[in-house]
């Protein structure tokens, strides 16, 4: 049986295994899920062993453990590929009842598997694992393979950078594969050539030393919620330009030729409407939507808390207010420099009666990958084979912080071999993974390893 026949005849069994993996609520941002993080790592390690990888390990870190697995049976003269993925998932809290099914009880509906982590990133990591399973089962694995799967990507990838820097020999590879992005559609596959970086901050403002009656003190005590809103409102002008001094200084200006190339994959109003329900876009008017997502930085408020938000009214003058703010960064911005610029700006616009504190939660570099490496050309041929159409290149607005570190430390090309779809609802209610993407993804990945073996 060849690898393609193997994965095709085992579709149902694979789906059951993936469901088992998805039932583990391995949410890295919530500490009460630590035991689930461990269970997901154990499940993975065991599965690697089951599908024939010869060395499988849980590697402890100061944060969540890594799962490492390898099969080096192709021999020292064959190329080596390192696959990266993450087994942690986003929270699936559901205050407004937006999930139509239980996020941790996977269900197949209309050709898609619904669960938290279905596409991001358990389903996509699993797709790579099962492609390798098919090749090993068929006795036709043409390359050496290593997997490094982490458990804190969704909370900032704090510990993997150090691990990669300290273990370049263990992770030594000719190319890195990451399946944690999306394609444009089933008919139009795409390969991501750029990801944005990030600086994630928390801004807290404090006024009086405890909450006060708003009638007894309103008018003489400055309201911290009001002060925070004032600070946040000063972050953008009416057109969406960021007002933090120096914020854009290092943003690389693309040539007309580069802009023309990127314009081949525009972001349409129709897509905006389909995916968000909105017909009015927002943002820097001098850039097209695909540019605002791909090559322009942003500053977003991700959360805002202060005062009374429970049922009914409470006339309180809150002592504190807090905002979570993240900046998506592009070449050649530096995450630490952006943090310092935002800090200085917040300090300079904080009203005198208020104290403000800015804390960094995490940060990570942007990444741009080489569209011309032999490995990328192998990936292009593999998508053509798996999806029946040649892939287009595009920039992605999201972030995968480890990609830049892989490029630098391992000195190997990174291929962002995504199999998600734009409407997969990652980080949102009703996350899904199209079964067609799963099947075509396995076919694409198998073909990729065969192409790389023939390089
Ligand atoms: N899989 C995503 C990255 C991504 C986002 C790919 C959107 C394609 C489209 C990844 O798991 C993710 O969400 N990363 C975080 C990283 C952050 C916490 C540093 C992100 O982009 O918010
Ligand atoms: Zn992800």
Image: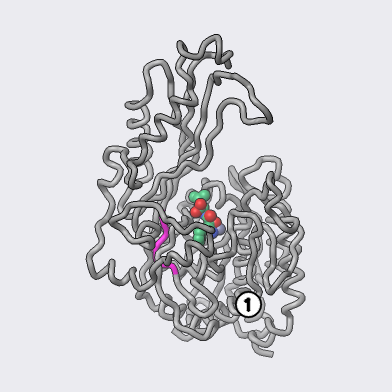
- Tell me if 59 is positioned left or right of 190 in this view: right
Residue 75 is situated, as x and y percent measured from the top left of the image, at 54, 78
Residue 360 is situated, as x and y percent measured from the top left of the image, at 46, 36
Range of the magenta residues? 192-196
On whether residue 404 falls in the magenta region, the answer is no
Q: Nearer the viewer, residue 71 or 385?
A: 385
- Tell me if 203 is positioned left or right of 137 in this view: left
Residue 186 is situated, as x and y percent measured from the top left of the image, at 55, 77
Residue at the image position 68 percent from the left and 52 percent from the top: 98
Q: Quadrant of residue 317?
A: top right
Q: Please indicate, yes or no, whether residue 205 appears anywhere in the rendered image.
A: yes
Q: Please indicate, yes or no, whether residue 163 appears anywhere in the rendered image.
A: no
Vertical placement of residue 128 versus 428, above or below: below
> Principal SS element in the magenta part?
strand
Residue at the image position 48 percent from the left and 66 percent from the top: 271
Residue at the image position 34 percent from the left and 54 percent from the top: 296
Q: Quadrant of residue 268?
A: bottom left
Vertical placement of residue 91 versus 403, above or below: above
Q: Nearer the viewer, residue 271 or 385?
A: 271
Residue assigned mark 1? 436
Q: For numbered disc 1, what is the local secondary structure?
A: helix
Residue 294 is situated, as x and y percent measured from the top left of the image, at 38, 60
Give the position of the C terminus as an image quadrant.
bottom left
On whether residue 195 falls in the magenta region, the answer is yes
């Amino acid at each position: 049986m060849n690898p393609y026949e193997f994965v095709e005849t085992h579709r149902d069994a694979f789906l059951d295994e993936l469901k088992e993996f998805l039932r583990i609520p391995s949410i890295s941002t919530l500490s009460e899920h630590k035991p689930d993080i461990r269970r997901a790592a154990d499940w993975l390690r065991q599965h690697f062993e089951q599908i024939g990888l010869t060395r499988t390990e849980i590697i402890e870190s100061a944060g969540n453990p890594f799962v490492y697995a390898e099969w080096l049976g192709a021999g020292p003269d064959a190329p080596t590929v390192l696959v990266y993925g993450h087994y942690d998932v986003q929270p699936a809290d559901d205050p407004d009842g937006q999930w139509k099914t239980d996020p941790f009880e996977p269900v197949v509906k209309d050709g898609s598997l619904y669960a938290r982590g279905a596409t991001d990133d358990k389903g996509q990591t699993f797709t790579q694992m099962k492609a390798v399973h098919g090749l090993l089962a068929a006795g036709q694995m043409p390359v050496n393979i290593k997997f490094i799967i982490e458990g804190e990507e969704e909370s900032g990838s704090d510990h993997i950078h150090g691990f990669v820097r300290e273990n370049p020999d263990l992770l030594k590879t000719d190319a890195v594969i990451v399946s944690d992005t999306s394609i444009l559609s089933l008919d139009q596959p795409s390969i991501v050539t750029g990801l944005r970086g990030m600086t994630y901050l928390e801004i807290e403002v404090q006024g009086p030393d405890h909450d006060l009656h708003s009638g007894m003190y309103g008018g003489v005590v400055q309201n911290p919620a009001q002060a925070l809103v004032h600070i946040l409102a000063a972050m953008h002008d009416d057109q969406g330009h960021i007002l933090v001094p120096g914020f854009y200084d290092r943003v690389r200006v693309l040539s007309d030729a580069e802009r023309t190339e990127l314009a081949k994959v525009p972001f349409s109003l129709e897509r905006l409407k389909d995916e968000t329900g909105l017909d009015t876009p927002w943002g820097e008017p001098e850039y097209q939507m695909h540019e605002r997502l791909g090559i322009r930085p942003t500053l977003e408020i991700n959360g805002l808390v202060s005062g009374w938000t429970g049922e009914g009214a409470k006339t309180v003058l809150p002592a504190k207010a807090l905002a979570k703010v993240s900046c998506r960064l592009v070449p050649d911005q530096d995450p630490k420099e952006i943090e310092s610029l935002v800090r200085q700006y917040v300090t300079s616009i904080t009203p005198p009666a208020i104290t403000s504190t800015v804390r960094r939660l995490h940060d990570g570099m942007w990444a741009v990958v080489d569209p011309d490496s032999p490995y990328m050309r192998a990936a292009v041929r593999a998508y053509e084979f798996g999806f029946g159409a040649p892939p287009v290149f595009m920039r992605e607005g999201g972030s995968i912080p480890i990609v830049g570190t892989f490029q630098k430390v391992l000195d190997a090309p990174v291929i962002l071999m995504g199999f998600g779809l734009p409407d997969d609802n990652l980080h949102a209610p009703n996350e899904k993974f199209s079964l067609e993407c799963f099947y075509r993804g396995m076919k694409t990945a198998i073909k990729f390893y065969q192409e790389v073996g023939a390089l």
